[in-house]
Image (cartoon, rainbow, N blue to C red):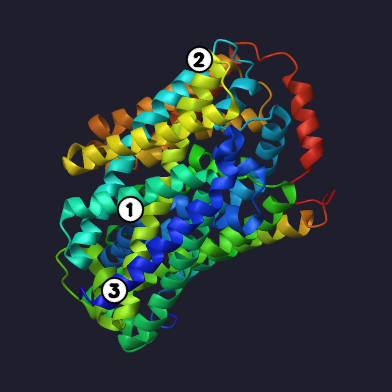
Amino acid sequence: MYSATIISVLVVYLLILLAIGLWGGRESKTVSGYYVAGKKLPSWVIAFSSNSTGESAWLLLGLTGMGYTVGAHAFWIILGEVLGIALAWTLVARPFKAYTDRFDSITVPDYLEDRFRDKAHVIRWISAVIILSMVTAYTAAQLTASGKAFDSFLGTSYGTGVLIGAAVILYYTTVGGFKAVAYSDLLQGVLMFVCLVTLPLVAIPAAGGWTEVMGALHAEDPALLKPMGSFGLTLPGVISAMGFVGIGLAFLGAPQLLTRFISARDQKQIVEGGFIAVVCVIGFDVGAVLSGMAGRVLFPGLLDPETVLPEMSASLFPAVFTGIFLVVVLAAIMSTVDSLLILASSAVVRDIVQQIFNPKWSEKRLSFYGKLITVVIGAAAVIMALAEVRMVFWFVLFAWSGLACAFTPVVLCSLFWKGTTRAGAIAGMIGGFVTTVAWVVFFKEGFYDLYEMLPGFAVGFILTIGVSLVTDPPEGVGEEMKAVREAVGSPFRRG
Amino acid sequence: MIFGLPWTSWLLLFVAVGLGLSISLAFYLAHRGDE
């Protein structure tokens, strides 16, 4: 398994990433260049970058494992993610892009501060604390996955795997900035798409064909083919389905995804990118779930269902493709980590240093400190990953929803309701984030494991709207919103 | 059962895929000529 072929494929992939880093370097000498590639990215780059950032190694290992474990019940995840991405691009992206261009924002906290006229910078501080805490832990967990992937596919030590993964990501992220991150995400997204579309096309015939796979799953347990799974139409079943759909809500407002809309060259890129992103996620998710279902027939009784993809890649394909599947798992990890690192760096250098302390530094110097902070946060994550802090794993469970619940309700209200106030936004951000954490720690077990995204969203919205109703919105936001709406028009009507 | 899968599961899968494609296509067709 640890053949020279696999290593060769891996080396070629890593060299391509290093080259992308060098190529992106020219753009990364200013703050705007480093954090949003100078707002020049085309549709297919922002579409694939957004999807591959949103989907970490969870897509390849977790969602295939979910198809293996619960069968057709995992179709609810496809519904949630496809709807989340379709609505993000059609409803959120254009007005958000119009606002951020109007304010000349390059980060989500930039936008929120200008939208709510937050001269005391409270929203920036809250955003920075939430982003830094979530990103460092999430990155550490992804690097842990990198260590394990190297260990299981190549037999290197765990620590070597963590260090190789981190070194490559840190190199192209610091040297190449957001441009390198976005273009490497494109490469990684295309690799993930091709592999996840190919895998069921090979695995289902290998298991005897579609009807045979379904027949074998039915013979093992008829619930594997039903949308409500083994729960049936019961309260736990409905809660489980809602939780699966809820995973897709994060696409509507997680800051690492909204940054892609800011970096688009213009509104036209968003119009084209929406369709590409939806087709891409359909390939990702349908491919992953069907692969897991076929994998259950091919490899029954796996102790860890999340190993079904490595098992299939090793058994059904020649060595060169096994190498490509290893690269795809690493691609999923790297495309998430690079985007999170650059988000955290922007939270420190752009949102705190440049905008609050406002030192008279040149763009080049600020960009240099941005790169330095990227390395520092990456190094902190490496130390956590090397120490194998197991707490990281329970922490990462809500990192995705923690970021989403803190920002999404506030961003949605800010885009569509002129009555949203600064106090409402602050309450919604803190409430959404704290609820996510508290739900996992105190309440989740008692509520049929309801996914924290749903209560986090509910509290975020209730607090944003409730507090806004009893406070006054900033002056001039009504005219501003009217101008943005006139500029972007209705999502589904011409003109 | 249709091709071995209950019709309810097919329905869920088609709603997921169809809804996503319809929304994004309608959005694209409405704005493709915008400046």
The percent position of residue A317, horizontal first and vertical second, equals 31, 82
Q: Quadrant of residue A305?
A: bottom left
Residue lying at the far bottom in this picture: please name it: A208
N-terminal of the pair, mark 2 or mark 1, is 2
Of the residues tagged 3 and 1, which is closer to the observer? 3
Residue A331: where, in percent of width, then height?
39, 59
Task: Identify the residue position indicated by label 3 in the image.
Answer: A6
Q: CA distance from mark 3 to mark 1?
A: 42 Å
Q: Secondary structure under badge 3? A: helix
Residue A451 pos. (x, y %):
34, 43
Q: Earlier in the sequence, mark 3 or mark 2?
A: 3
Mark 3 and mark 2 on one chain: yes
As drawn, is A1 to the left or to the right of A168? left
Mark positioned earlier in the residue sequence (3 or 1): 3
Which chain's residue wears label 2?
Answer: A
Q: Nearer the viewer, mark 3 or mark 2?
A: 3
**Quick check: A269 left or right of A185?**
right
Please tell me which residue is depicted at 24% across the width and 49% down the height of the picture. Answer: A144
Q: Considering only vertical position in the picture, is A114 above or below A399? A: above
Identified at 37% across, 65% down, the residue is: A328
Q: CA distance from mark 2 to mark 1?
A: 41 Å
Q: Can residue A242 be seen?
A: no
* Pointer 1 residue: A237
Q: Secondary structure at mark 1?
A: helix
Residue A149 position within the rendered picture, expressed as x and y whole percent measured from the top left: 24, 60
The residue under the point 77% across, 36% down is A485
Which residue in the structure is indicated by mark 2? Answer: A122
